[in-house]
Amino acid sequence: MVRSRITSILSRACGSALALFFFLQPQSSHAAGFAILEQSAEGIGYAYAGAVAGYGDGSEIAFNPAAMSYIDGTLLSHSSHLIIPSSEFTDAGSSNVALGGIPTGGGDGPDGGETAYVPSIYVVHELNDTTHLGFGIHAPFGLATEYDSTWVGRYHAIKSELTTLQLTPAVSYKICDNISIGASLNIAYMDAELSNAIDLGTVAFSQLGPATATALGLAPQMSDGIGSVTGDDWGIGFTLGATYAYDEMNSRVGLAWRSRTTGNLEGDADFTVPSAALPLTSTGLFTDTAALAHVSLPESVTGGFVHHFDERWSLLGELQWTRWTRFEDLRIQYASVQPDTVVDEGWNNVWRYSLAAAYQATDEVQLSAGFTFDEEPIADAAHRTPRIPGNDRKWMAFGINWDVSEDLTLKATYAHLFISDSQSNVTNSTGNNLVGTFDGSVNLVGIGFDYDLG
C-alpha cells in the first residue's frame, strides 16, 4: 500500500514538474558564473546559508542528500522562484580597432536581463530508521540575456540562453544517531542557443579587398549578417555528502561535494546573409551547417551549519568553493569550412560566503534574514562579454514560514542582489571592441510549500 502510494506521488510530481520545466522561460543566471542557487524557496530567505546542513524541505536532494536523514515520514515539496534581473550597459567608446578605431554604431541594449520562472519539486520518503530515498527535478545552472539586434555590442552577443533540467534520485543512510551519509545521481539535460551579428562588411574588406567590397555595396557595419547556434545534450554527474548532529536540539554541520557534469551540445548553425554579401559564401563560409559546443558544469565543495541556540533562535552559515577554471573558453566547432568560433573566457575559481538567522516568532510563524557575498569568476574587463556580464554580488534576504496545519507549511521569501558595476573591454575576431559598463541588480521572489504525506 505504501509503495503504491509513493509510486503514484512520484508519477504525479514528475509529470507536473516536467510540464513546468519544458514550458518555462529561459533561466537567468545570477549566482557565480551561470549557476542557479534557486533550489528552495525557503532558502532564499536565508540567502542559502546552511543549505548543505538541510532545511527539512526536500532541497537536501539538490544540496546535500545526507541531510534527508532529518526528514520524518514522506514529504512533498514544491518551490516557485521568480528571478528578475536588470543589466544596463553604458557605452564608453566602442569601435573597430582593426579599421583604425571606427566608432561602432548602435544603442546601449537596452536592458539585457531576462525575467525567468524557475520551479523545483522534491519527494523524500523515510524507508526505515536508517534509510531515506528522494527524487527531485530542478535547474542548477542556466543563463539568459538578450539585446536588440542593432545594439552597440551586437557583434559579441544578441541572444544567449542555456537551460538545464536535472533529474536527481538520491539516497541517505544514517550510520549512527548523529552521523549520516548520502549520494545523488545528477542527470542533466542541457539546451543552448547563442546568436550575434556578423560584421560582413569588415569581413569583405579583409577577404575581398576594399575596392571589390565597396563595388559590391559592402561596408563595415552596413552589411550585417546574423549567426545563430543551437544544440542540446545529456550529461551525468553525482553528489556525495555527510552530516553530523552535535547536540540535543539537532544542530548540525554538513559537507557536500558535487562532481563536474559535461555535455557535447550537438545542433545547428544558421547564418542569415544579406544578398550583397553572398559572394562570401562561395567558399562555404557563413553557410548553414551542423555545429558542436562543449559545456562543463563545474564541481563544487560546500560546508555549512545550522545551530539552534534555543527553541526560538537559530544561526545558519555556509562556505562554498566552485571550480570555474573548467570554463577556459567558449568554442563552437562547425561541420563546414567555417573556422571555430572561440571566445577566451579564462574564469577563476570562486567562493561564496553566507550567514543567516531564523526566529520562531510564534508556534506557527518563523522569520528569517540572511546575507551572502558571492564572488564572480570573470577575471577582468578583457574577459567580460555581454553574454554573461556578471560581477561580485551581495545578497540581502528575508523570509517567512507559516505552518498552516500539522501537515502543510507555506513559504514566502525575497532577496535583492547588489551587483558591482562591471567593466567590459573585449575584442572579437573582426576587431570590434566593446568598451563600457554594465550596471546590474537582481530581485528574487520565492513561494513554496511543504506537505507531509505521513
Image: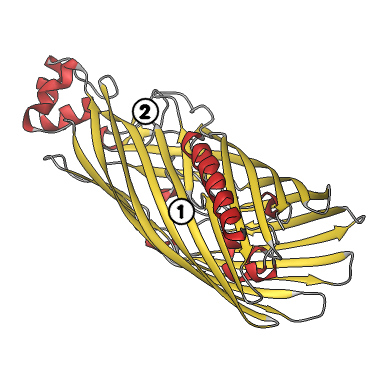
Q: Position of residue 174 (x, y in %)?
A: 62, 78
Give the numbered dot on residue 333.
Answer: none
Quarter in which the C terminus is drawn: bottom right
Rendered position, 350 above or below 446: below
Q: Amino acid at mark 1?
A: Asp
Residue pushed farthest front? Answer: 1
Residue 34 in sight in this render: yes
Rendered position, 315 above or below 24: below
Residue pushed farthest left? Answer: 283
Give the residue drawn at x 22%, y 21%.
Answer: 219
Q: Locate residue 259 relative to residue 321 in the image: left or right.
A: left
Q: Locate residue 218 relative to residue 298 in the image: left or right.
A: left
Q: Which residue is mark 2?
A: 103
Q: Amino acid at mark 2?
A: Pro
Q: Which residue is mark 1?
A: 380
- The number of callouts visible is 2
Q: Residues within 10 Å of mark 2 (few under 14, many from 20)?
A: some
